[in-house]
Amino acid sequence: QVQLVESGGGLAQPGGSLRLSCAASGIIFSDYDMGWYRQAPGKLRELVAGVTRGGSTRYTDSVKGRFTISRDSAKNLIYLQMGSLKPEDTAVYYCKAERKVVPIRYYWGQGTQVIVSS
C-alpha cells in the first residue's frame, strides 16, 4: 500500500520559516520524481517545487530564493524548507510522487495546512 504522509505544517508569522516533510512508503523511491504542490482556498492546485529522481530541482517563480526542496533517498523522505514566508503562501501543501516511466503511476499525500499570518 502506497502512503505519502506530510508533516510540519502549521501557523507561521510573515517572514518566518517552516519545514515540511513527506514520508513515502510502498514505492520504490528511486523510481519517482517528487514534488510539493499547494492549493489555496478558491484556487487551483499548483506546483511549488519538484525534485527529480536524479536530484534536479525546479520551483515556481513565486517561491524561488525562499523555498528549498530536497530528498533523502536513504530515508524515503522529501523536505520543503520554506523561508521568508508571506501570507500568500497560505495553503494546503501536498506531496506527490510521480513515476514517469512505464508503468506510469502517481500518488498524492493527504496534505498539510500552512497558515502565514500575524
Image: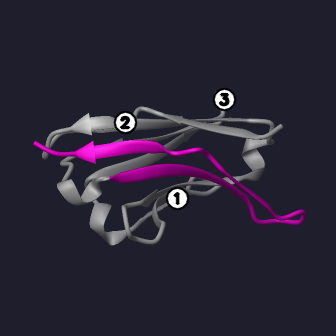
Q: Which residue sits furthest left? A: 118
Q: Is residue 62 above or below residue 32?
A: below
Q: Is residue 113 above or below residue 64?
A: above
Q: Which residue sits furthest right? A: 103
Identified at 74% across, 45% down, the residue is 30
Label 2 secondary element: strand
**Mark 2 vs 3, N-terminal side:** 2
Instruction: Say which of marks 1 and 2 sits in front.
Output: 2
Label 3 secondary element: loop
From this viewpoint, is residue 19 visible?
yes
Give yes or no for residue 98 being in the magenta stretch. yes
Badge 1 vs badge 2, beta-carbon distance below 8 Å: no
Count residues near mark 3 (Cα–Cα under 10 Å), then give few for <14, some for 14-19, many for 20+.
few
Label 2 sits on residue: 19
- Measuring from the top left, give residue 96's x and y in whole percent: 61, 53
Label 1 sits on residue: 50
